[in-house]
């Protein structure tokens, strides 16, 4: 982190908004910042007018730390706001979703079509016994049925819990059990570089001895997927769709504080947390950020490259752009399939005006070289976004020059699954950007950098990132574990939200996010708890103990290194390395596969038996031992241990 900080602090470049961008921006009056900080409730009430409410709310916010309620007693429906109202207001034939399949098939889904498909899907869920408040787990690839399933749940007031298609059967099962879902929606298989991802086979394994009664299966891959359908449990999407009524379905009026969805994310223990988002506040937050940070206009074509399995896809493919009546581009597959120009081909084909992607992808494009970008006309782009991890200034500049062609403002957006929408990011018509800084908290967001006592740091210093006041789209609790919610997010500073990131505040008051300060690592923008990987490791019969750390990685941001001690009598070998990596993939998913495994006779520990993770990181990043990407000699770690004790 210290190398990263040095680079960041030397960054002097400043990019002022262009005159032409400023003139047309949705948010172009700088007084918005002061107005929102003086009277945040008024600011958020104004933003809430961009949604349609069935019944007005009685008060904007009730704050009983750490619990907030927003738009109290207001009634609305998220699917109504994302679909039906646009059809009513003349957007029936406007494209809501341009969907691009990996093999090259595509669909342009208008708001009118989306309404019909959402209603059919909602009736299908009803026919499977799903009622308001019930949880539905969704394990789908990036196909149209995924956003349709989310909206179908929202339409009838069911709570969706999407599990990213890259998760293993075991990870899916854990999330089904925690959410206590009765229905699972999945597909026969998904495409990844032309090959099938066996979603249905994983689902079959996951649902055994869980409350799942019905599995709805989308046929995406076809016969080659070779799946088995279990009688009385599994039913094909198309088959059930043909059986339900085609009549329009009225949206269920939901309380603003009714749960819209659960989304599991990693924390510092081995058990993932079900983050709870409610309807009114979440939708206001998502919708506002599209208009403010992304300067979204009616004719924009918004291409967010995230998967809907993560929060970025929830907010910036589904609920944000669709609540704004916009057009989104949704791509099923890999950025290098069939060629390394796939994203640019998609941008050109659909005339994308806004692109939102992750630093890890940008670094990959940099490595591939600009020739793939140059093959396409990207003149439709007018704004670029970055999310998921700190963006290094070099990647920022490359994004600016080669994708934005020097023309497009870049919005580096800091936020989390828990925050629901972007929190720290420039308003592109108002804020000068600095490569590598997410700049300033958005209007109505009280983010700051504080010291150990919770006091704001002086400019030029670093500390804990915090958010002092509630905001509409904040998580309401951790599903089934309010204690964990209190301790994790409000345990350090009374009534103040602790995101778990370290940050630096520069002399202009700009915030530079430095990365996680807890035992969560960020691999290619995916949040992974070291404890989850450790518990996967030690569940293997050969492993006695494991310590997992994130080390810096040129493309992925961070990569996983596991230090492992083996049980008595087990010999280390290359085969065992491969077996242990595969074991983690089966327990969690491919994104958690350790980059390297280092066997050691003992793990370095402090006298109080705490594993010295910092030392392990130093070893993995070559600061102590040089290159240790291969097996380390156990005695070297022993030596380190004694060296540490000497200096202790
Ligand atoms: C990191 C993804 C620096 C951060 C939306 C946060 C970032 C975690 C940025 C949340 C950014 C996200 N700059 N770091 N612009 N955006 N992060 O829940 O560590 O998957 O806590 O949400 O990603 O990851 P999550």
Image: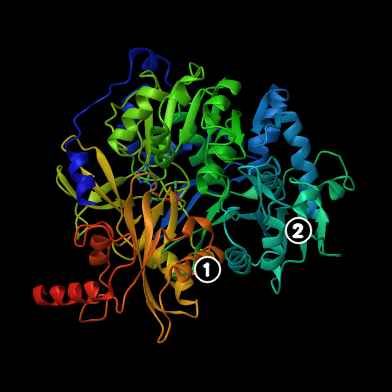
Q: Which residue is mark 1?
A: 583
Residue 109 position in % (x across, y down): 71, 30
| Vertical arrangement, residue 301 with respect to residue 579, above or below | above
Q: Which residue is mark 2?
A: 130
Q: Which residue is nearer to you in this view: 381 or 445?
A: 381
| Vertical arrangement, residue 404 with respect to residue 636, above or below | above
Q: Residue at x 43, y 48 (%)?
A: 525
| Vertical arrangement, residue 577 with respect to residue 646, above or below | above
Sooner in the amino-acid sequence: mark 2 or mark 1: 2
User: Distance from label 2 to label 1 (Cα)?
Assistant: 35 Å
Mark seen at residue 435: none
Q: Residue at x 49, y 55 (%)?
A: 591
| SS of the residue under disc 2 | loop
| Vertical arrangement, residue 297 with respect to residue 61, above or below | above
Residue 21 position in % (x across, y down): 39, 17
Q: Nearer the viewer, mark 2 or mark 1?
A: 1
Q: Residue at x 67, y 44 (%)?
A: 151
Name which quarter of the figure residue 96 lies in. top right
């Amino acid at each position: 982190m210290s190398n990263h900080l040095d680079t960041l602090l030397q960054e002097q470049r400043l990019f002022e908004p262009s005159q032409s961008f400023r003139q047309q921006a949705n948010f172009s009056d700088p007084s918005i910042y002061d107005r929102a900080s003086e009277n945040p409730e008024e600011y958020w009430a104004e933003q809430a007018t961009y949604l349609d409410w069935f019944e007005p709310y009685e008060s904007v916010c009730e704050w009983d730390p750490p619990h907030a309620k927003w738009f109290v007693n207001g009634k609305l429906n998220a699917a109504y706001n994302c679909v039906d109202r646009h059809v009513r207001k003349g957007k029936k034939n406007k494209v809501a979703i341009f969907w691009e399949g990996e093999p090259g098939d595509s669909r342009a889904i208008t708001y009118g079509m989306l309404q019909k498909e959402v209603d059919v899907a909602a009736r299908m869920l009803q026919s499977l016994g799903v009622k308001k408040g019930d949880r539905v787990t969704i394990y789908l690839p990036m196909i149209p049925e995924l956003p349709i399933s989310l909206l179908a749940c929202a339409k009838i007031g069911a709570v969706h819990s999407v599990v990213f298609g890259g998760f293993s059967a075991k990870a899916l099962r854990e999330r089904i059990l925690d959410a206590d879902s009765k229905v699972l929606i999945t597909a026969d298989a998904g495409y990844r570089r032309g090959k099938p991802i066996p979603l249905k086979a994983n689902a079959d394994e996951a649902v055994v001895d869980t409350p799942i009664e019905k599995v709805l299966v989308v046929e995406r891959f076809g016969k080659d997927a070779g799946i088995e359908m279990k009688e009385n449990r599994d039913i094909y999407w198309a088959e059930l769709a043909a059986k339900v009524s085609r009549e329009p379905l009225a949206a269920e009026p939901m309380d603003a504080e009714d749960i819209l969805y659960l989304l599991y994310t990693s924390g510092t223990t081995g058990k993932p947390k079900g983050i709870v988002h409610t309807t009114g506040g979440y939708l206001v937050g998502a919708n506002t950020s599209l208009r403010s940070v992304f300067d979204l206009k009616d004719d924009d074509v918004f291409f967010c490259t995230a998967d809907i399995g993560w929060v970025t896809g929830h907010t910036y493919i589904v609920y944000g752009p669709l609540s704004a009546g916009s057009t989104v581009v949704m791509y099923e597959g890999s950025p290098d399939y069939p060629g390394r120009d796939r994203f640019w081909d998609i941008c050109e084909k659909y005339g994308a005006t806004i692109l939102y992607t992750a630093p890890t992808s940008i670094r990959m494009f940099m490595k591939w070289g600009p020739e793939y970008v140059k093959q396409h006309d990207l003149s439709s782009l007018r704004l670029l976004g970055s999310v998921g991890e700190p963006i290094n200034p070099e990647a920022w500049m490359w994004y600016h020059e080669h994708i934005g062609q020097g023309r497009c403002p870049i919005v580096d957006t800091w936020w989390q699954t828990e925050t629901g929408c972007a929190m720290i990011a420039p308003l592109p018509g108002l804020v000068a950007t600095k490569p590598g800084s997410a700049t300033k908290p958005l209007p109505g967001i009280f983010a700051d950098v504080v010291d150990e006592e919770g006091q704001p740091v002086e400019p030029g210093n670093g500390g804990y990132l915090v958010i002092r006041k509630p905001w509409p789209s904040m998580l309401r609790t951790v599903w089934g574990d309010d204690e964990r919610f209190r301790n994790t997010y409000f345990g350090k500073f009374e009534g103040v939200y602790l995101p778990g990131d370290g940050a630096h505040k520069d002399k202009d008051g700009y915030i530079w996010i430095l990365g996680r300060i807890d035992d969560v690592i960020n691999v290619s923008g995916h949040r992974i708890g070291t404890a989850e990987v450790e518990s996967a490791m030690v569940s293997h019969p050969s492993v006695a103990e494991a310590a997992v750390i994130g080390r810096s990685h040129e493309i992925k941001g961070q990569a996983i290194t596991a230090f492992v001690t083996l049980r008595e009598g087990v010999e280390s070998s290359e085969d065992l390395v491969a077996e242990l990596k595969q074991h983690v993939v089966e327990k969690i998913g491919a994104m958690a596969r350790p980059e390297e495994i280092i066997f050691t006779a003992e793990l370095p520990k402090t006298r109080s038996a705490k594993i010295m993770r910092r030392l392990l990181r130093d070893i993995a990043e070559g600061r102590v031992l040089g290159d240790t990407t291969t097996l380390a000699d156990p005695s070297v770690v022993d030596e380190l241990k004694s060296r540490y004790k000497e200096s202790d």
